Image: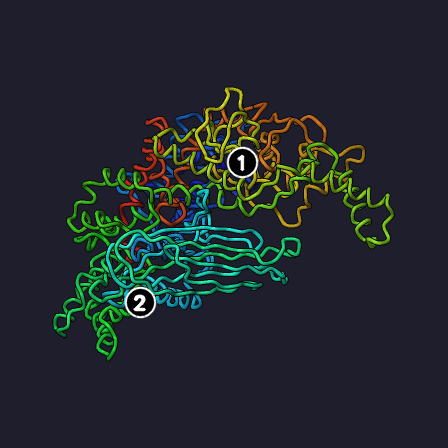
Amino acid sequence: MRFRLLAIFALVLSAAASPGAEPGAAENFRRQIEPILGNYCYDCHADGERKGNVAFDEFKSDAALLGGHELWLGVLKNMRAGLMPPKKKPQPTAEERRRIEEWIKFEAFGIDPKNPDPGRVTVRRLNRVEYRHTIRDLMGIEFSTEVEFPPDDTGYGFDNIGDVLSISPILLEKYLAAAKAIVTEAVPTVSRIVPETKIAGNRFRGEGGDAARRDDFLSLSYYEAENVAASSEAKLAGKYRVALELAVRGNFDFDPGKCRVVFKIDDREVMQKEFGWHDFKTFTFEFDEDWQPGAHRFTLTLEPLTPVAQKVNSLAVQILTLAIRGPLAEEHWSRPPNYDRFFTQDDPQSPDVRRANAREVLRNFATKAFRRPVDDRTVERLAALAESVYAQPGKTFEAGIAHAFVAVIASPRFLFRIEESEPGAEGQAIANVDEYSLASRLSYFLWSTMPDDELIRLAASGELRNNLSAQVQRLLGDPRSESMVRNFTGQWLQVRDVDGIAIDARVVLARDRGDEREGEKRRVRIRELMAIPEDKRTPEEKEEMRLMFEQFRKRGKGIELDRELRDAMQRETEMFFSHIVRENRSVTELIDSDYTFLNERLAKLYAIPDVSGPEMRRLALAPDSPRGGVLTQGSALVVTSNPDRTSPVKRGLFVLDNFLGTPAPPPPANVPALEASEKDFGDHQPTLREALELHRKEPLCAGCHTRMDAIGLAFENFNAMGMWREKERGQAIDTAGQLITGETFTSVRELKRILVEKHRLDFYRCLTEKFLTFAIGRGPEYYDVETVDQIVTKLDAEDGRFSALLNGIIESAPFQKQRTAAAATQIASP
């Protein structure tokens, strides 16, 4: 009966084939692929069965058969991952799997392995990180994009995806305002200024030589006598102006404190002033000095005028800066900071020379800003903008150039990464991007910023592709490559989210101990006591409150996830990934390793002894340690937890999505929370394993939870803060499980070993797709399958070395090439 249906299906397909279909591919399907599907898949996906809404015998035409890219991509992924056919069903042979894979890739998808489709890339706007770094390298200043611009949208887990980096009218206004603010701060508008030396307040030291302070200023309490000093050297004789900037910082509430501040220059008193309370107010004092060359000393003494017993709140004088300007004589004036970054000579007076100089300055700047040579027409328009300002009475040449600079960094050619094909690509459907585009792709991938002078020089001479390997190594060796580490791990592994995850340490630890209900009773009792007016509480009630608060403090002491500990978690993951990159280690160490990076705070959380100090360092792990790899690092464990407990579902999904490439579909609507299952356990508080087992009895929940729960439960020995535990709610934790592909394990160590040994290729493929997405700014498509496969083949041949992954991506068609205008015309044609 089965084969009679197959024959009828073949005749129907043949009769219904459309003129535009590919008869070879359809015929190969009927002759080679359909019999295999009939043997292994039709029980669930044909003859009226549509599990997963998939039926292989319902194609209306050859065009429908060959155009079902999403369907065939799902078939390919599920077959490779071992999800289909299910393990309990008969399995295709290796040869049959190979035939299905090749038909899908080369016939259904139409991939040419020798000339893969690089895909469609939307023109990409600089995201916030890229904009900030580009301004830093172009203008020489830091610009806070996190404050000035709204968060970037994300796609496929990353914030550099071209399709989602849109630009709204409001954002355009912000870019215009930012351009003006950046140019005002960075670009000098005069060619000579009085030399200035600034001494930050934190450089003032007491007699004991206090250690350097974290803030730029120095804060001195009104209630403590202080004597601090700093020094500077005058190289030339002349008149100088010294400007001292102080601030008074008090709390919002009034404080009666007063103090006297005495300021001396070279042991000569030049200022004495009394200060009272201010919430925040700055004061500037200027002093003219006639100096000879040599060292000069500045001393500030604070004398309290109010007894400390009258102190109500904190009140302090802050030394902000001490500025030394001079010599004031014009012959000693010098170039402003940043002048040589933009200008090549002093303001020329001749109008013709001025125009020529303006063109040169603006051509150089626009070429850097646009990441490619700028055309003469654009240079002339910018020069005209500059002249419209500097030709005005009282305006300087530099002010005119600055005005034109605003137009450059507000231009779409700066804000967007506009790419071109290499010369001679006319008529080709696929062509290499030109070398300027390649330089930008490389620098924004590895540095999140604009190409430097060497990349542009090689692109200009047409030698970048010939020197690509050496340039990749150079870029990786530069500190700016840490941006790739932070941005990729921050989004792929969600490390960016660690700081924003709310974790209630007391509730988490109470759950571990099994006294949640007692804790809730205590909290209710405290609320009752707090509701009683203080003057009406009995001595017994006051003592009860004191004991309860003391108990809360003891239980919460030293275990809060404060900023310092969260920073250490982020740095552990970043340093771990960076180590794999720099040392060219196997990427499988991301799953399991015998080392990690810790400081004292993080080691204490992990219960690893003999680690002291705040600095992060590489540490070998004990052979039986459950740590190793990123999955058991604090960052991953925290971001996959709930505020009051672990989440096996989140942890299982995290592994499926980010390491195996088989994410579960989103949950159906109106699924009750897991905690709703706990009411059915009247005799005890259930563990998460017990609650999940009950949850899986729901038909809508069973399919997905079977895939992810076993993985998530393997991590249950780690609580929501990443601490190791043996019990949950006083009961021993069971971490045993079985993957949907059949492998069994009893611990997280065994699970990690299975992932490395049995699912290595799945991980290689998933990591390659994630890294490729990050590199090219678009999500993976069906036509990328062969590109990913080729990189995975190289990666496996080189034992997972990171260089094979990185070089494979940089040498791939999606990174090196683009569809041309000719390709767009062909696609649009009927």
Q: Position of residue 787 (x, y in %)?
A: 33, 39
> Badge 1: few (under 14), some or many (20 or more) residues near its Cα, within 10 Å?
many
Which amino acid type corresponds to the residue marked 2 in the rendered image?
Answer: Val
In this rendering, position of residue 78 left or right of residue 771: right
Question: In the image shown, does 40 or 543 lie closer to the viewer?
Answer: 543
Q: Amino acid at mark 1?
A: Gly
Residue 84 appears in the picture as rendered: no
Callout 1: SS: helix
User: Residue 462 got which mark?
Assistant: none
CA gap between label 2 and label 1 equals: 44 Å
From the image, tell me which residue sits under label 2. 406
Residue 323 appears in the rendering? yes
Q: Which of 527/130 is in front?
A: 527
Q: Residue at x 79, y 51 (%)?
A: 530
In the image, residue 86 sits, relative to residue 324, either above or below, namely above
Q: Which residue is mark 1?
A: 634
Sequence order check, earlier mark of 2 and 1: 2
Where does residue 795 sit, x and y in percent of width and height?
Answer: 35, 31
Quadrant of residue 463 within the rendered picture: top left
The furthest residue to the front: 268
Q: Residue at x 63, y 53 (%)?
A: 308
Q: Secondary structure at mark 2?
A: helix
